[in-house]
Amino acid sequence: MRSGIAAGHTGYFHEAVYYRCADELLAVAVPFLLGGVAAGEPTMVALGEEHAGLVREATGGNPGITYLAGGEMYARPASAIRAYRALLAGHVAAGAGQIRIIGELSPWMFGRTWDWWSRYESAINHAYDDFPLWSMCAYHAEQTPEHVLREVARTHPWVAEPGGHRPSPSYTEPAAFLMESRPPADDPIQRGRPVVELTDPLPASARQAVVAADPGTLPAGAVDNLVVAVSEIVTNAIAYGQAPVRLRLWAGADRIVVTVSDQGPGPKDPYAGLLPRSDGEPGGLGLWLTHQLCDHVTLDRRDTGFAIRLTAGGSTAD
């Protein structure tokens, strides 16, 4: 049995919360959380440390509320989806009729990596629809960039406010949103000339290029992960794209960036990379693996073809 505004709803009930100060956030969060506790529902908080502390104080440290390690949950979009689906499945197996979560993305995610977090916010409308989940995603209305807020409105079907709940008039179904052509933000390292340019490379040549570009200063395992990811993407481009396949690589002290492009339309699956394919079609598992190995992955669909950019290491906030 579901409670609150989600009573009678089947699947995922996904809301955005726009707030301008802590009191506005608490005015929505506290009734939401205490209502879940009163209804005997698993009730969780995945907010940053500051806001989680305010919620804990405002709810009197209610033992019915669980606090998740938000930073760990949101390491990468595909990993977050995998972790949340496992969490939700566990609660459903234990008999939960509804699960409540309020969370927020860290402000650094609104920078150069916002493209894959906007894809995350859209894709979870499908990815979590197997579960009786009611969640709220909090965004500061004045500190969040305008382009981010526009996409928040398009990826959340509902808006939660102190006075109630309303549909989001600009909500776009994920299958449509995820297939739109939205060129990702440029990486500053790409303003210089690439150190490697290959046309129609074999996967082995692509792997060798990444290994040779290793500056020796990236986090442990980052280059090894990128080698695997580049090999998977080049293999997919050769098998499913349209020639020519082009690889370009930039290397700096803090990161390596690789783009792989071809003249095809890209994956037909709108959830490619964020979810493993379940329809038996080839090519989906490698892209899903890549999204969990790299520090940033962009998908760029244009009339002239399709490109994937893979990043290992580096700051994602600039």
Image (spheres, rainbow, N blue to C red):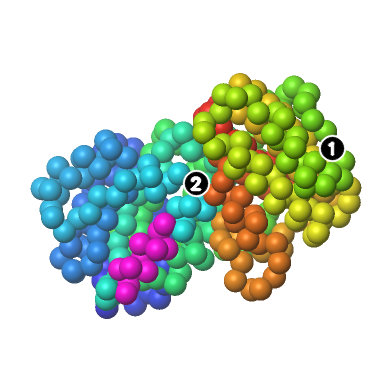
Residue, disc 2: 76
- Tag 2: residue type? Arg
**Other-residue count near label 1 (Cα within 10 Å), few / some / many at <14 / 14–19 / ≥20:** some
Residue 85: give x, y in percent of width and height. 42, 63
Marks 2 and 1, how far apart in space?
Answer: 28 Å
Q: Which mark is residue 198?
A: 1
Q: Which residues are magenta?
A: 83-93
Lower position in the chain sequence, tag 2 or tag 1: 2
Quadrant of the rendered image containing residue 163: bottom left
**What secondary structure is the magenta-colored segment mainly?**
helix
Q: Residue at x 49, y 64 (%)?
A: 127
Q: Position of residue 42 (x, y in %)?
A: 25, 64
- Residue contact at pointers 2 and 1, CB within 8 angstroms: no
Q: Quadrant of the N terminus?
A: bottom left
- Residue at 71% in and 48% down: 231
Residue 109's tag is none
Q: Nearer the viewer, residue 203 or 317?
A: 203
Q: Do we see residue 185 in this rendering? A: yes
Q: Amino acid at mark 1?
A: Leu
Residue nearest the viewer, comparing 1 with 95? 95
Please say whether residue 28 is visible from this viewpoint: no
**On the picture, is 150 further left or further right than 180?**
left
